[in-house]
Amino acid sequence: MKNILEEVSTLAQTAHIDLPPLLQALYRDGLTSYGKDRADWQANWEHYLQESPPALASSYDFEWLDAEAIAETIKGWLHPESQNGRSFFPFAQSGAGDVFCLTTHEDEHEGECVVVYIWHDSDAHTIEAFSFADFIYSRLVTAMTDMSHLLDDLSSAANARLCLLADIRRSSAYLPADDATRLQAYLERPVIEAEVNYGRHTERVPCLITDDDYKLLMQGRRASVDWPVHIVARWDIQRP
């Protein structure tokens, strides 16, 4: 029986996408899986989240796709024949069905992939990061600025902090040493509160870092930018 790294490597090769070594390592070491199986995750999810979470478990609205879902997303939506010759490797999704993908980018070195976020019902797509390592790093930094979404499941800021710290420890081990050191410097931080603006109203949210900390950690990184590429909607794909 193939393991997930073998399965996704075959899918990526078929899509003409080179999987970044960091992503390969996450697949190899089981950091994109939710427990041993569905029953195990349902029975022990709280333990996993606070002790040994999947990578980016602390990140807002992010869920890894398994090999079957990746294959179906490519075959049923994001394949070159339906997307003007462009290839994608979808590796995660939001709760609404929007997807995080690897794809090539004309402004980067030949063959190098960027991480894009593709909406299922809008053309407001974005380049989330210009390398997969930067994607993991920036998602962890952003999670440190607002842990409120973790309260839905983990009930307290203290438990949310445990999830975030476990995620930083596990995920940062795969990052370049300098990035890992920057993140791990905040592991002893207590929970604080900060104001976040949501349109016309402001909320106070639990977090580990201030806005100044965020700017310092993200210094030199390219921020998420609009990606003005038309993606044919899933429901408009012509079926053979």
Image (cartoon, helix red, strand yellow):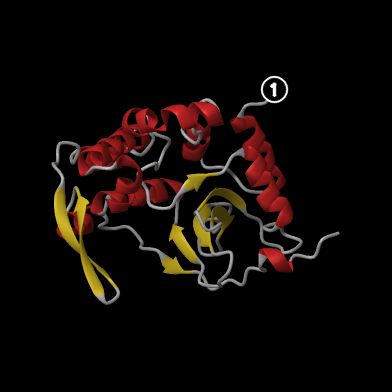
For the question of whether residue 49 can be seen, the reply is yes
Eyeballing the image, is 28 above or below 199? above
Query: 40 or 181, which is in the foreground?
Result: 40
Q: Position of residue 174 (x, y in %)?
A: 39, 35
Q: Amino acid at mark 1?
A: Met
Residue closest to the eye, 239 or 186: 239
Q: Residue at x 13, y 50 (%)?
A: 192
Reply above or below: 163 against 73.
above
Residue 94 horizontal side relative to residue 15, left or right: left
Quadrant placement of the C terminus: bottom right
| Image-based side of 193 in relation to 223, left or right | left
Q: Residue furthest right?
A: 240
Indicate the secondary structure of the residue bearing disc 1: loop
| Residue depicted at 43% across the width and 53% down the height | 61
Q: Residues within 10 Å of mark 1 (few under 14, many from 20)?
A: few
Q: Is residue 12 visible?
A: no
The residue that appears at 21% across and 59% down in the rendered structure is: 215
Q: Quadrant of the N terminus?
A: top right
Q: Residue at x 30, y 33 (%)?
A: 166
- Seen as rendered, the residue at the extreme top is 1
Q: Return the x and y of residue 59 as percentages of the image width and height.
A: 37, 48
Residue 93 at what x, y percent from top left?
Answer: 52, 52
* Residue toward you, 153 or 96: 153
Quadrant of res 219: bottom left
- Image coords of residue 175 (percent x, y): 36, 38
Residue on which the image places disc 1? 1
Please state the total of marks drawn on the protein image.
1
